[in-house]
Amino acid sequence: MTDEPATSRRAFLAGTAAAGAGLVATSATAQTPDPLITEVQEWASIFGDPVDATPYGMPIEFESHVVRRNVEWLTESTASSINFTPIHALEGTITPQGCAFERHHSGAISLSKSDYRLMINGLVDKPLVFTFEDLLRFPRQITTAFCECAANGGMEWGGAQLEGCQFTQGMIHNMEYTGVMLRDLLAEAGVQTEGKWVYVEGADASSNGRSIPMEKALDDVMVAFFANGEALRKEHGYPVRLVVPGWEGNMWVKWIRRIGVYDQAVESREETSKYTDLMPDGRARKWTWVMDAKSVITSPSPQAPIRHGAGPLVITGLAWSGNGRITRVDVSTDGGNTWTPARISGDAKSKALTRFHHDINWDGQEMFIMSRAIDETGYVQPTKQALRDIRGLNNVYHNNSIQTWWVRADGEVENVEIA
Amino acid sequence: MSKSRELALASALLTTLAAPAFAETLGLGRAALPEEIAAWDVAILPDGTGLPEGSGDVETGDEVFAENCASCHGDFAEGLDSWPVLAGGAGSLTDPRPVKTVGSYWPYLSTVFDYVHRSMPFGQAQTLTADDTYAITAFLLYSNGMVEDDFVLSNENFTEIVMPNADGFYPDDRAATEYPLFSAEPCMENCRSAAPEVTKRAVDINVTPEDPDGKPAGTLPVITVASTGEPAAVAEPAAQETETVEAAPEAAPEPAETAEAVPAAADPALVKAGEAIFKKCAACHKVGEGAKNGVGPALNGMVDAAMGQIDGFKYSKALAEMGAGGGVWDAASLHAFLENPKGFVKGTKMAFAGLKKPDERDAVIAYLSTFGP
């Protein structure tokens, strides 16, 4: 009788040692009754918060680490800067607005619906001004789309640089937008036959103008005023922003105030000096609007190490393509020697974030984990070296290469490049 | 039978009803007035479309640039700290560190005029006249060795300027040069010839923001099996930190010493207003814990301190001399400086135009006085 517990305890300890993980015991191996179960906890006895404690709810305090973060040394001024979505801590596909990355060129402005005006002019039959209320009277559409900064991963061109997929791939968010189609607004003004481009500008001090070819403008571009079921946040362009599915985030003009129709591209600062891709021969690609297929394992990753030791492990990640739907994501745990298709969880929508899961039984040994997206055009996410072979090292934008995470035996994870 | 007839009728009706909404315009919005279009459509196109009448010479441009732009871009458009370099870099586009400037990279002069006129100076956009903008543009051409110092730029000769890198751009060709390479069925097994070898580690570069425990910022907290019923360990410090920050101002007035040290912290509303107005200053000036000098000096402890004394900041000669002469930033001198920086300190590097409203200056001074040295 007295022997029995000791025996089983020894057996348990031996078992843990054999597993080799040397990590904290899991709940399955508890030896003493768990007071969280055996004792009446405070929350099980007294009241919690009443209704209306927070008329607009914020995440519970235990999630205080799930916030946007910036990298201070990247920019001189936070008024013209960027921060990163904590994708390592999120699941599913929709990015909550409150932690969706921000990119401003002259700060996020407070523009009310009553002060909002949208002008369409240039090569149109009727130059028009719309109020916010006018926009609410056009037929509404819903679309889910990822918005990725062209510079997402840009710091990684030269080599592994930042520890965490929030920092290496976090210039992205994915929301469900409601708004009106740009083509409906353009039809109202009547685009003249020589009108081949629209130029879109914001109401902020930077204006951040971008030229969009008419074909895209008449296709799937939306003038949006709701995101994830509620009004846009200030930092995402309240009250109205442009949604340009599949194309680089810089074109998604916030606080949009003017749509000019032209027979040529304006060649603004944001489409010449910036957001052009310098190639090894010293010339540069321009109008590189599409964000090619890409994926990343969001956990495990440097900010999301494995803490539960060997055994069942969920590898989770995101995939997306500016050219359509994700059809497959392959995962490798051995540095790209062997690849296995992961599960696509939920819907794979065109030009939207797609969630993949890969469930493995981790042996507790080090791993080099990678993911590789394939989209409906057959495009396969390339390695960083394959991109460098074509684009060299001076190419800041459009790094859609495969990310390698080095998972150590102790569960810690590093951002590395491997040969 | 009757059912399908009903359906047919219904769909015919629907078509009739729905048709006007798609075939015609909705009649929403109103005509944009010429004055409104002129105010908002300030785009300048490569062929010169949109250029306003006006002109500016290099010499004037030098002055306007020094006053409005040099605090970030440098007197010679060389770019201070990490602010954009606007001159030089010719022939560097194939270098390991290419210098992409107006002269070395920008393909169109129209872009310079457009951007300077609508978006600069940073934090005071749309304050430059057309003539100022022509002058600045002329100065930038001069800084890049493209024109002589007697050059005058105007809407008349603008499109004659061809930028050195005008032919340096070509439309996206990924569909031809990359997609075929990246569209083969990928290898699934035995894809490597050797075991993986780590060649680059982010930890070696050590530039990632960190949490207080030295882990990458935002590392998920440990969810331990809480056999003791204690809350998760790592989530705690963050929560406590927030509480401490919030609690500090409330606790501050209590001890007599602290109250003495922060005399102007009397009116929280004024301080709050000052915090909002300070956003105009924050691009160049930092305050609070860990504030470092940037384009302008960090401003902790500057109220009632000697002028030109913030550690490690290279002041203009004028301000350094005022400090050496015993000048102190009291309410009166701060009001005078903030109202008209260049009027009060002739030669100051501060490009800010000033706060014309006395209550705004009061608020900013109250806000600044909350930051001790």
Image (spheres, rainbow, N blue to C red):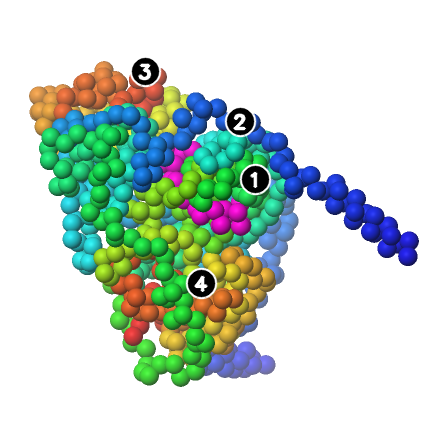
Instruction: Classify 10 Å Cα crowding around label 2: few (below 14), some (14-19), many (20 and above).
Output: some
- Residue B56: horizontal and vertical position, in percent? 20, 27
Pointer 3: what residue?
B358
Residue under disc 4 on the same chain as residue under disc 3? no
Q: Quadrant of the N terminus of chain A?
A: bottom right
In the image shown, does B322 or A375 lie closer to the viewer?
A: A375
- Residue A289: horizontal and vertical position, in percent? 41, 53
- Residue at horizontal 62%, vertical 31%? B27
Pointer 1: what residue?
A187
Residue under disc 1 on the same chain as residue under disc 3? no
Q: Which residues are magenta?
A: A203-224
Q: CA distance from mark 1 to mark 4?
A: 32 Å
Residue under disc 2 on the same chain as residue under disc 4? no
Residue B347 image-quadrant placement: top left
Pointer 2: what residue?
B31
Indicate the chain on which mark 1 is placed: A
